[in-house]
Amino acid sequence: TSPVIHIDPARTISHVDPRIYSGFTEHMGRCIYGGIYEPGEIPTPSQIPNTGFRKDVLDALRELNVPIFRYPGGNFVSSYRWQDGIGPKHLRPRRPELAWLTEESNQFGTDEFMQFCKEMNAEPYICLNMGTGTLEDALAWLEYCNSSANTHYANLRRSNGHPEPYNVKYWSLGNEVWGPWQVGQMESQDYAKKAFQWAKAMKLLDPKIELISCGETGCTDWDRVTLKKLVPVVDYHSIHIYTVSEGNHTVNVMGPAAAEKAIEISKSLIDLAKIEAGMEKQVTVCFDEWNVWDPVRAPGEKGAEEHYDLSDALAVAAWLNVFVRKADIVKIACIAQSVNVISPIITSPKGLFKQTTFYPLKLFATLMQGTSLNVHVASPVYTGKTVPDWVGKLENKTGGEDKLTKYIDVSAVLSDSKDEVRMAIVNRHATEAYAVPIRFGPACECDNGMVKVYEVWSADLKDNNGWDGERVKTVEKDIEWTGEYEVKEHSFQCRFYP
Ligand code: AHR
C-alpha cells in the first residue's frame, strides 16, 4: 500500500487535554536529588537562590509546558512516610527505602514539591501510600495540603511557614498495587474494597479533589475488577505501560500500538462499569506512567538512566500520537519520568543535556493542542512483533488487528483558533522514505502556499545526544506545499497548514 493521509477538519474526535503532556517526579535515582533539587552544590547562576532548585532543570522543563507533576512515586510511595518530609530539615529522619533499596534523606518533601510546582506553574498530583500507609496517614496528608480549618495538620502546615492551603486536586489511590515488586501488593478484590473506603473518606474531607484508581495496563482482569467497584467513587483510572526496544528499532517504535489497544479496552471497561453501576458520571484514563524503558539497559535499582537515541525519540512521538488520537478518553498522561530517571533531561553537577526524546515531547506540548482530528492513513504495514518476548502476554491481548501496524503513524489537531491544521507524522520505517500525498476534506482550504515543518531526524537511528553535543534535535523549515510531502526514513515531523 502506498502511503496516503486523508484528513477532514470537520471530523473531530475531542479536545486535546493539555494535561496529556504532564510529568512525574519520583524519589528514585537522581530524579529529585541531583535532578530538580541540588542545594548547596551548584554554583550560581544554575541554582535558584534559597530553594535548592536547579535553575537549568526548571528552565528546560518549562520548555515542555508541563501542566501537572505526579509525586512522590511510583514504587517509592508504597513505603513512604510523608510526615518525615516536612518541618525543619535537620530534624527529618533518614530512612531505609524499600522500592529501590536506597536511603531516603527526606530533605525534599511535600512543601518542597509544592514550591517546585509553583515555580513550574504546574499543578501537583499526589499518589497515596497504600502499601505501609494507613487511611489515617492519607487523610492527614490531605488535611495538611488542602485544609483551611483550625485543625491539627492544617495548623502544622501553617507552623511550617505555609499559611495558605495548596489545594491539591489530584490524588491517586496507590501505585501498581497489583505488582509483586510492590510493598503491600494486594489481590484485585482486596484493593478495590480498600480503595473504595479510602475514596469515600478522602472526598468527605475535601469534596473538590479528583481521585484516580490504580489500574494495571488498562486491559487486564485487575482493571475490570477494580473499575467495577471504584467507578462510582473515582474520576480517572490509571494505566502504566512502558515499551522497550531490545535494541530493535521496529519493536521499539511499534510498541505504542499495544498501548492504543489497551486504551480502547480500558474505555470499554469503564463504560461497562458505568452501565453496571447505572451511572452517567465522567470517568477517563489517567495514563500516569508511560515511556520507552528497557530495564535491562537501564535497571531501576541503578537509577534507570536511559541514554536515548533517535529510535527512542520516534517511539515517544508514536506514544504521543496515541494520546492525541485517544483524546476522547485519555485526559491525563505523565511521562515517566521528568529528570534523569528514564527522562528527556540528563543532569550532572555542572549542567544538563536534552535527550533525543526531549524534542518530540516539546513539539507536541507546544503545537499539538486544540481539537483532535480523525485521520485516515493508508500505509505499508509492519507484521512482526510489537513488544519483546517477556511482555508477549500483553501483545497477545493487545496486539491490534492481526498485528498489522502502520509504518506511517499520524495524529492531527485543529488549532483552538481554528485556522491551522497541525499534523504529527512519524515514519517508523528504518530505511524507506515515502512521498506521502495529504488529502484534505472539503472543510479545509489548506491547499497552497508555504507550510511550516519541524523535523526530528538524523542519518543514523542510533544517533543520540550527550555531553559532546546534540545530534538529534528539531530543525525548522518552510516548504512550498505541493499536495505531497517527502517523509524521510525514520523521521518525525510536525507540520502546519494555515
Ligand atoms: O517509573 C519507574 C517505576 O516504574 C515506578 O516507580 C513504578 O510505578 C513503575 O513500575
Image (cartoon, rainbow, N blue to C red):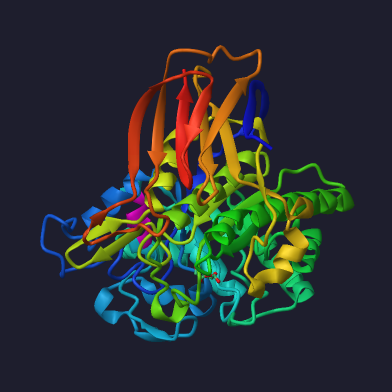
**Residue at x 66% of width, y 27% of height:** 12
Q: Nearer the viewer, residue 435 or 149?
A: 435
- Give the x, y percent position of residue 151: 47, 63
Answer above or below: position of 463 versus 378: below
Side of 159 relative to 492 (left or right): left
- Give the x, y percent position of residue 105: 33, 80
- Give the x, y percent position of residue 225: 80, 65
Side of 163 relative to 276 (left or right): left
**Residue at x 36% of width, y 57% of height:** 463
Question: Considering the image in quadrants, where does the N terminus appear?
Answer: top right
**Residue at x 58% of width, y 51% of height:** 209
Side of 48 relative to 108 (left or right): left
- Which of the 4 image quadrants contains residue 454? top left
- For the record, the magenta segment spans 113-118
Is residue 147 among what the camera can see?
no
- Residue located farthest toward the left when viewing the structure as drawn: 44
- Which of the 4 image quadrants contains residue 221? bottom right
- Which of the 4 image quadrants contains residue 396? bottom right
Q: Nearer the viewer, residue 495 or 341?
A: 495
Answer above or below: position of 490 versus 43: above
